[in-house]
Amino acid sequence: MSDEQLARLKARLDQGPAAAGHDQDQRWTLARVVALIATMFHLRVGIITTAWQAMRRLGYTPQLPIHRAIERDEAAIARWRRYQWPAVKESPHGRPPGSCSPTSAARP
């Protein structure tokens, strides 16, 4: 795909899946990108090769959204990380970290 086609594709991808008729799920899948490329440019491309390479050239990564959720509350996340996470990540006092598996060698 040419740079001009990639720029047009990126503009369309930035509009979101709903603008392309995918209302039920707000994620771009490679199959959806292939269908979008076919519609926009009248090209038949492969999922693994062309579509994936185009997405990588545009800065998209697998299973890693570029945009964050609108509902995301950064202040609440910062509070949780500061006050809750240290308590969660500490192991219970008086017990060494280990396994509770019945096959564990350290079982009493």
Image (cartoon, rainbow, N blue to C red):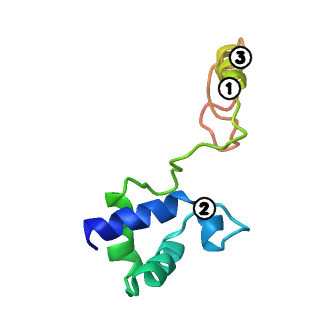
Q: Earlier in the sequence, mark 2 or mark 1?
A: 2
Q: Secondary structure at mark 2?
A: loop
Location of residue 86 in the rendering, given as x and y in whole percent from the top left corner: 66, 16
CA gap, disc 1 and disc 3 = 15 Å
Callout 2–callout 1 Cβ contact below 8 Å:
no
Q: Quadrant of residue 81?
A: top right
Q: CA distance from mark 2 to mark 1?
A: 23 Å
Place of residue 77 in the rendered image (x, y in percent of width and height, measured from the top left): 68, 26
Q: Position of residue 40 (x, y in %)?
A: 45, 79
Report x, y in % for residue 45.
37, 83
In the drawing, what numbered circle is on residue 87? 3
Lateral position of residue 106 relative to residue 102, left or right: left
Which residue occupies the foreground of this view, 94 or 64? 64
Which one is closest to the eye, mark 3 or mark 2?
2
The numbered mark, 3 or 2, whose residue comes first in the sequence reads 2
Q: Earlier in the sequence, mark 1 or mark 3?
A: 1
Please tell me which residue lies in front, 88 or 4: 4
**Residue type, label 1:** Ile
| Residue at point 58%, 60% (across, down) | 16
**Residue, x 65% and y 20% (percent of image)?**
78
Contact between marks 3 and 2 (CB within 8 A): the answer is no
Secondary structure of the residue carrying numbered label 3? helix
Which numbered disc covers residue 27?
2
- Quick one: label 1, few (<14), some, or many (20+) residues within 10 Å? few
The label shown at residue 77 is: 1
